Image: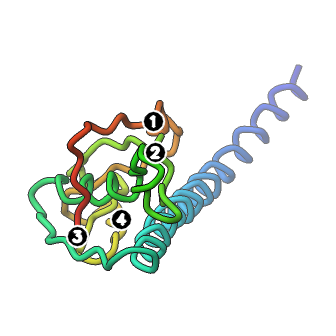
């Protein structure tokens, strides 16, 4: 019986040592995943600019309207094949993030030319970086009168 108590005590000590290391590892992986999402969006901006025109669109720090307009422009492909832009869509149309101004979250903010990653502890509004994958849903349905940004 005393051996069982000793084993449980040792496991408790090991768990108390491993938990902070695991949390630090998890935080580093979130940094990497958020940076990857930012890089993918910025690569889509660059591909769009190479094929069409530079996306220069004013930023609005109080809302995510500008982030969403740019995202939808990158996701748009004209249904008329003769009017569709070369290479479009430039970003997966199934990506449907929500907005967030929670400074404990990772967010992507449009700066006027590229997406910037807002790390936890930084104030600002942007597209929430979701690590569970629930921001990838059915493809966004564009209205018939959709106007792309940046011209």
Q: CA distance from mark 3 to mark 4?
A: 27 Å
**Dot 3 alpha-carbon crowd within 10 angstroms: few under 14, some 14 to 19, many 20 or more:** some
Gap between marks 4 and 2 measured at Cα: 25 Å
- Seen at 56% across and 65% down, the residue is 32
Q: Classify residue 38 as left or right of residue 99.
A: right
- Are dots 2 and 1 in contact, CB under 8 Å? yes
Q: Which residue is mark 2?
A: 93
Residue with the mark numbered 3: 150
Which quadrant holds residue 114? bottom left
**Residue in front for this viewpoint, 12 or 127:** 127
> Which numbered mark, 4 or 2, is in the foreground of this view?
2
Query: In the rendering, at what x and y percent does residue 127 appear?
Result: 31, 52
**What is the x, y in percent for residue 88?**
48, 58
Q: Residue at x 46, y 45 (%)?
A: 93
Q: Which residue is mark 4?
A: 119
Q: Which mark is residue 100?
A: none
The image shows residue 80 at horizontal and vertical percentages of 42, 46
Q: Give the mark, 1 or 3, whose residue is nearer the N terminus.
A: 1
* Residue depicted at 64% across the width and 47% down the height: 16
Depth order, front residue of 143/3: 143
Residue at point 77%, 39% (across, down): 11
Q: Residue furthest front?
A: 82
Q: Secondary structure at mark 4?
A: loop
Neighbour tally class for label 1: few under 14, some 14-19, many 20 plus, Cα within 10 Å: few
The residue closer to the viewer here, 41 or 38, is 41
* Between 84 and 118, the one nearer to me in the picture: 84
């Amino acid at each position: 019986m005393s051996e069982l108590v000793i084993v449980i005590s040792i496991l408790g000590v090991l768990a108390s040592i491993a938990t902070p290391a695991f949390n630090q590892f998890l935080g580093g992986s979130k940094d990497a995943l958020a940076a990857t999402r930012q890089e993918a969006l910025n690569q889509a901006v660059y591909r769009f600019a190479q094929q069409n025109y530079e996306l220069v669109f004013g930023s609005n720090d109080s809302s995510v309207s500008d982030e969403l307009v740019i995202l939808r422009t990158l996701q748009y492909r004209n249904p008329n094949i003769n009017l569709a832009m070369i290479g479009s869509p430039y970003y997966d149309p199934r990506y449907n993030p929500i907005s967030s101004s929670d400074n404990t979250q990772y967010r992507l903010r449009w700066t006027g030319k590229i997406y910037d990653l807002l790390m936890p502890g930084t104030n600002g509004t942007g597209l929430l970086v979701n690590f569970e994958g629930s921001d990838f849903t059915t493809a966004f349905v564009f209205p018939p009168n959709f106007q792309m940004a940046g011209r």
